[in-house]
Image (spheres, rainbow, N blue to C red):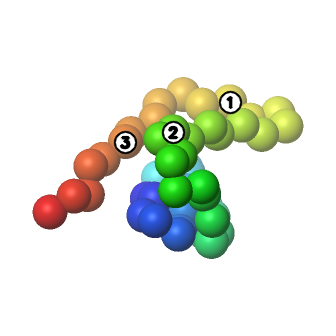
Amino acid sequence: MVDKSSLEIFAVDGEKVFTSLIYPDQDATGVSVFGAGAKFIKLNVLNMDK
């Protein structure tokens, strides 16, 4: 989950959770995800606008 200042990553069906505060530039329009030895099998992106 990402909002204007936080990022949450859930892995292994929620068994592993990573939460961090982020401070992107105001004109930022994307997200990059990478890690040493990491392999993404499926990535879900949900729009949380209301």
What is the three-letter code of the residue carrying label 2? Answer: Gly
Frontmost residue, 3 versus 45: 3
**Is residue 9 toward the left or the right of residue 39 in the image?**
left
Q: Given the image, on which type of amino acid does mark 1 rest?
A: Lys
Which residue appears at 53% of the width and 46% of the height?
A: 28
Label 1 vs 2, first from the N-terminus: 2
- Indicate the quadrant containing the N terminus: top left, top right, bottom left or bottom right: bottom left
Q: Earlier in the sequence, mark 3 or mark 1?
A: 1
Q: Quadrant of the C terminus?
A: bottom left
Q: Quadrant of residue 20?
A: bottom right
Mark 3 vs mark 1, foreground winner is 3
The one nearer the camera, 12 or 33, is 33
**Label 1–label 2 contact, CB within 8 A:** no
Locate residue 4, reporting x and y percent. 46, 65
Compute the Cα span from label 3 to label 1. Answer: 17 Å
Q: Which residue is mark 3?
A: 45
Q: Which residue: 47% across, 41% down? A: 29
Q: How many marks?
A: 3
The mark found on residue 39 in the picture is 1
How far apart are the two marked residues, 2 and 3, measured between alpha carbons?
12 Å
Q: Residue at x 52, y 56 (%)?
A: 26
